[in-house]
Amino acid sequence: MLGIRPRIPSGCAISGIMSRKGRRMNGEAIIQSIALMHDRSNGLGGGFAAYGIYPQYKDHYAFHMMYHSETAKINTEMYIREYFFIDGSEPLPTRPLPQIGESPILWRYFLRVRPEALNVNGFLKDERDFVVDVVMYINNQIDGAFVASSGKNMGAFKGVGYPEDIGRFYRLEEYEAYLWTAHGRFPTNTPGWWGGAHPFCLLDWSVVHNGEITSYGINKRYLEMFGYKCNLQTDTEVVTYIFDLMVRRQKLPFAIAAKAVAPEFWHKIDRLPADEKELITAIRQVYGSALLNGPFSIILGHSRGMLGLSDRIKLRPMVAAEKDDLFFLASEESAIREICPAPDRVWAPRGGEPVLVELEEGVEV
Amino acid sequence: MQKLNGKGMHYKDLNQWLKAQVAAGEREFLLENINGQRYLGTGISADLTITVQGTPGSDLGAFLDGPTIIVHGNGQDAIGNTMNAGKIIIHGQAGDVLGYAMRGGKLFIRGSVGYRVGIHMKEYQQQRPVMVIGGTAGDFLGEYMAGGILVVLGLDRQPNQPLVGELVGTGMHGGIIYLRGEVDPAQLGRECSIFPADTEDLQLLRAILAEYCQDFSLELDTIMAEQFFKLRPVSTRPYGQLYVG
């Protein structure tokens, strides 16, 4: 064999659907949407995040795990049991598919933190900070174990393959969610592996990303100062942790966090009105190391909504659309029209302009 | 006229069907239920008309060499990539990087377009590409433009909605950009300057826009009633001294 392969004209794909009324829909639509962009991925990664799928366990941390061996599973369970009540433990339901190669052991747990675990030398630790520490420990200290997602009433379903095959493999038609995001991967600088597929999740955060974060080294060192460890061989990991840091821990509004990761250029800042100029200058000074450089378009999912954002000079595509209570974001308009042929409104957000969509006030999920 | 229902069809199959039909002598096509199929019309050197219903995928008419493509819907990214001859008419809006390195033919869009439109358009002797954008354009319009004609009309514009984005004509060293309305000089790249359109410009514009208005059933005199400005490069060799000084 000469090893001649056809050119694969790809470049990653993302898609997201959400009902602002919290209406749940099964995984069929999001699979169709991401499948329309099949040619943007190369079969080395696909994945989904789904919110609202575990109403029977909605106050539990749902851990979706990937294990490379039985030993890794035993070690992780011993560790988890020390700090959590395990109220549910089962394999993630899958269906065998010829398109999907060998998978890690895929398992999920529904966990409650043991109250005594939060007592650290007489100080009460924030529960979610504690869960972050646990995720960092498992991912970095337990050989062959990887937390795919760790939020409440949500989960990540990802692996090596084309996204539509990954969706069928995980039987997503059996889940009902009010928010779905999806990713088709074309790994550029790092290998395609199960844990490295998108979305990247921590607590309720999930990130699907098309692009490359060239500021990765700076972002990684910055995040390390706050206890985040970036060892998963992908740039996207830093995006998830930056939003956890800025929005959950430091309680910044999404709009400000979005400005920190994708601020205006200085030549534009010079022309802004005085108060805006002061604000953006302050954000750039304080959060210079959180700036994401390089081409990207991302969808950040969380339990109350999603944020769509592309880099400042729009080096990656992003289209938004609305239809009644539904909100769509995708790399291509056709991926939206595949599941919603006649949206009320379709538009392309500007580079660096955050698209924020949230559940309507009062909607409980 | 040959009709095709493109629902669920892969772009390779669709383009192969087109090529086979063209080889058999067909010259009129109606493609229905198109959604996301890329490279439509690529690789066919002939005078023919392809009417598209739906949202064609990116790289519509890439390297286009003769056909006319009419889209009743929105376009995506990279339409008319390096096109050589022919015409593309988009009745809706379109995405980023339209007419990249376009070197001939016409690209008419009724609505607004995204970023990096008309980058590195070029011309040679009789080959002079023309692009007309009915709405507004995003940043980097006409970046590194080396030739051809780009027109932005700003129709149906909201108050305070800018006609073009930032860094227009950055690195421009040939060609001409016409703007229907004023623009803040701070939005321009350093390599171009703005002038009012003169009589000769208006004659050229009238000829181009007469065809544009016919394609979209618009009123030419209403469009010509506004003041036009033109952007020209300050130098034909902005980087001539870059490696010698």
Image: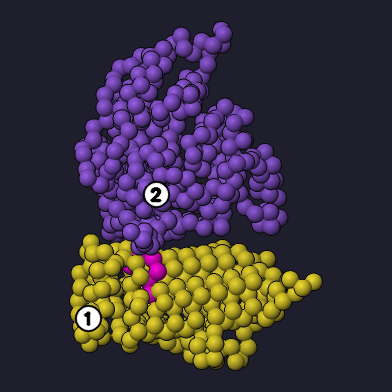
Whether B24 is drawn above or below A295: the answer is: below
Give the residues in magenta.
Answer: B54-61
Which chain does the yellow colour mark? B
Q: Which of B230 and B144 is in front in this view?
A: B144
Look at label 1 and name its amino acid.
Answer: Gln
Placement of the N terminus of chain B among the 4 image quadrants: bottom left
Placement of the C terminus of chain B among the 4 image quadrants: bottom right
What percent of the width, then of the height, locates residue A42?
A: 36, 53
Secondary structure at badge 1 equals helix
Total numbered circles: 2
Q: Residue furthest right?
A: B245
Q: In which quarter of the image is residue B124?
A: bottom right
- For the point 49% across and 27% down, the residue is A140
Chain A palette colour = purple
**Chain assignment, label 1:** B
Query: Which disc number belongs to residue B21?
Result: 1
Secondary structure at badge 2 equals loop
What percent of the width, then of the height, locates residue A135?
A: 45, 26
The answer to whether mark 1 and mark 2 are in CB contact below 8 A is no
| Residue that carries the numbered disc 2 in the rendered image | A185
Q: In this view, does A262 lie to the left or right of B192?
A: left
Whether B126 is drawn above or below B43: the answer is: below
